[in-house]
Image (cartoon, helix red, strand yellow):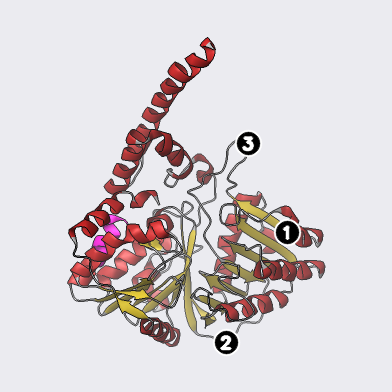
């Protein structure tokens, strides 16, 4: 009894106090926004029994010891606008996570989950040498099973198959579900396991990248996960609105390099022998594309920096589609400055997303945007999961990153920059179609609601 009392009354509180001091020092040393630092300090000091374990699992920003061991992504060659004819600033950010823009590509938008589902299966079916698939969520449903079965068929034909899943996003997936692929000789790996001894996983460093790459010559990239709410063989009234891009050409080899780095980190295997196979070059293809990665394996915060530079250089419009809007202070101020100087800034978000806490946290940010002159449009037909940005008529970006702190400051993400006028026009038309299903957000004026908005923003960095 005396020993138990000593443990509960003296030892545990003392250990908790020491741990809290260590975490407070760690929080202050992190390169964070003041809001994020304050939020974590308040959580650890005032609700330590909740704040301490939350910070241990979710709080580390970028370079934990494990993340630091991952090979940094870097471009293979410098790019100058004079070499490419691409004057937009994204083409000049190669040294910060972007790959050189390539021109000999073809690209096609996938604007429905049904189209994306069939294109994914067809692309896998056409593989001759290797298939690499990375996804955040693989559903334990008909869609996920169809993907696994398609990969297993190719593996039985002698095609090298690699499936990379995020351990948190695909937490429901087990070896039994993946058994058909394993039995056929396919390889699988989980990125950042949540629990492993010694403890390796970090819940805040997630691989949010979504890519399908075949023979290094064709790829699908975007925001769609592989589950029924995102894609499937037939239309469903509850299917989420999303966007992906199917491409062929040298840009696909850039997607392979990103996957190669992720696979080596997760599986400990170098896919150097799986380098893209040579093939006939399509001399008629002219679409200019550029992959840009972001995350702990990229210097600084590449996508975030690219967005902010784009805001300062935009001349006419910046249209943004995102399911969650919880930006850091600097990005928010960049958006507000763009709106105040007369840029047609429009933000399209779902009226109600699948994350109610994120919806609550975003309200204060949305109000500040509106006060600066931006138009905030709430998408009403259902869940909007697409992530896309349109800047003037110069460049469009589609990919996996949400416009929030978790995507732009923590997660491993990927964006595809599109410099083709025809596709940019299609994305413009697609966004206008979304706007037909939107209504303008009404700014909150009630004092109580404004107070709730301000309080929610204090804890937004914890989401």
Give the percent coordinates (x, y) of residue 34. 27, 46
Give the percent coordinates (x, y) of residue 221. 54, 71
**Which residue is located at x 39 percent, y 76 percent?**
380
Under tag 1, what secondary structure? Answer: helix
Instruction: Place residue 344 in its image quadrant.
Output: bottom left
Question: Which comes sooner in the sequence, label 3 or label 1?
Answer: 1
What's the magenta region? 326-335
| Residue highlighted by disc 1 | 178
| Residue highlighted by disc 2 | 283
Residue 331 shown in magenta: yes
In the displayed structure image, the side of residue 316 where residue 155 appears, left or right? right
Give the percent coordinates (x, y) of residue 399. 47, 69
Residue 257 shown in magenta: no
Give the percent coordinates (x, y) of residue 118. 64, 80
Q: Residue furthest top?
A: 2
Vertical relation: 372 (above or below) 208: below
Asked if the residues shown at circle 3 and circle 1 are in contact, with their CB atoms under 8 angstroms apart, the answer is no
Q: Residues within 10 Å of mark 3 (few under 14, many from 20)?
A: few
Instruction: Place residue 272 in its image quadrant.
Output: bottom right
Q: Distance between the residues labelled 2 and 3?
A: 52 Å
**Which residue is located at x 77 percent, y 58 percent?**
179
Instruction: Place residue 316 in its image quadrant.
Output: bottom left
Label 2 or label 3, whichever lies nearer to me, is 3
| Residue highlighted by disc 3 | 197
Vertical relation: 438 (above or below) 410: below
Question: Which comes sooner in the sequence, label 1 or label 2?
Answer: 1
Q: How crowded is mark 1: few (under 14 residues within 10 Å), some or many (20 or more)?
A: many
């Amino acid at each position: 009894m005396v020993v138990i009392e000593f443990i509960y009354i003296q030892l545990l509180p003392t250990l908790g106090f020491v741990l809290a001091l260590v975490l407070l020092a760690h929080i202050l040393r992190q390169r964070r926004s003041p809001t994020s630092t304050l939020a974590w300090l308040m959580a650890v000091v005032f609700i330590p029994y909740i704040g301490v374990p939350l910070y241990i699992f979710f709080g580390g920003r970028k370079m934990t010891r494990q993340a630091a061991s991952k090979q940094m992504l870097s471009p293979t060659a410098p790019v100058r606008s004079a070499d490419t004819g691409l004057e937009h600033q994204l083409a000049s950010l190669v040294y910060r996570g972007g790959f050189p823009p390539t021109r000999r590509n073809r690209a096609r938008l996938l604007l429905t989950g049904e189209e994306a589902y069939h294109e994914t299966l067809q692309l896998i079916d056409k593989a001759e040498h290797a298939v690499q698939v990375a996804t955040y969520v693989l559903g334990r449903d008909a869609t996920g099973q169809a993907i696994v079965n398609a990969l297993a068929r190719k593996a039985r034909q002698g095609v090298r198959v690699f499936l990379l899943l995020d351990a948190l996003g695909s937490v429901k997936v087990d070896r039994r579900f993946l058994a058909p692929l394993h039995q056929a000789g396919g390889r699988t790996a989980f990125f950042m396991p949540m629990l492993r001894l010694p403890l390796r996983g970090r819940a805040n460093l997630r691989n949010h990248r979504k890519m399908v790459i075949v023979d290094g010559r064709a790829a699908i990239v975007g925001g769609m996960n592989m589950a029924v709410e995102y894609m499937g063989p037939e239309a469903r009234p509850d299917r989420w609105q999303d966007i992906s891009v199917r491409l062929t050409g040298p840009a696909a080899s850039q997607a392979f390099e990103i996957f190669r780095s992720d696979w080596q980190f997760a599986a400990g295997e170098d896919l150097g022998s799986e380098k893209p196979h040579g093939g006939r070059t399509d001399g008629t293809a002219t679409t200019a594309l550029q992959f840009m990665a972001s995350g702990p394996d990229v210097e600084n915060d590449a996508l975030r920096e690219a967005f902010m530079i784009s805001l300062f250089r935009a001349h006419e419009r910046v249209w943004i589609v995102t399911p969650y809007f919880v930006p850091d202070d600097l990005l928010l101020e960049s958006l507000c400055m763009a709106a105040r100087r007369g840029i047609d800034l429009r933000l399209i978000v779902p009226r109600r997303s699948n994350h109610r806490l994120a919806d609550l946290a975003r309200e204060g940010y949305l109000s500040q945007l509106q006060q600066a002159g931006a138009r905030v449009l709430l998408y009403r037909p259902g869940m909007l999961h697409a992530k896309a940005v349109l800047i003037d008529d110069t460049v469009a970006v589609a990919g996996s990153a949400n416009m929030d702190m978790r995507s732009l400051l923590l997660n491993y993400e990927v964006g595809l920059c599109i410099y083709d006028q025809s596709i940019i026009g299609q994305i413009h038309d697609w966004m206008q179609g979304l706007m037909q299903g939107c209504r303008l957000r009404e700014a909150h004026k009630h004092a109580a609601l404004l107070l709730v908005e301000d309080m929610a923003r204090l804890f937004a960095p914890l989401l």
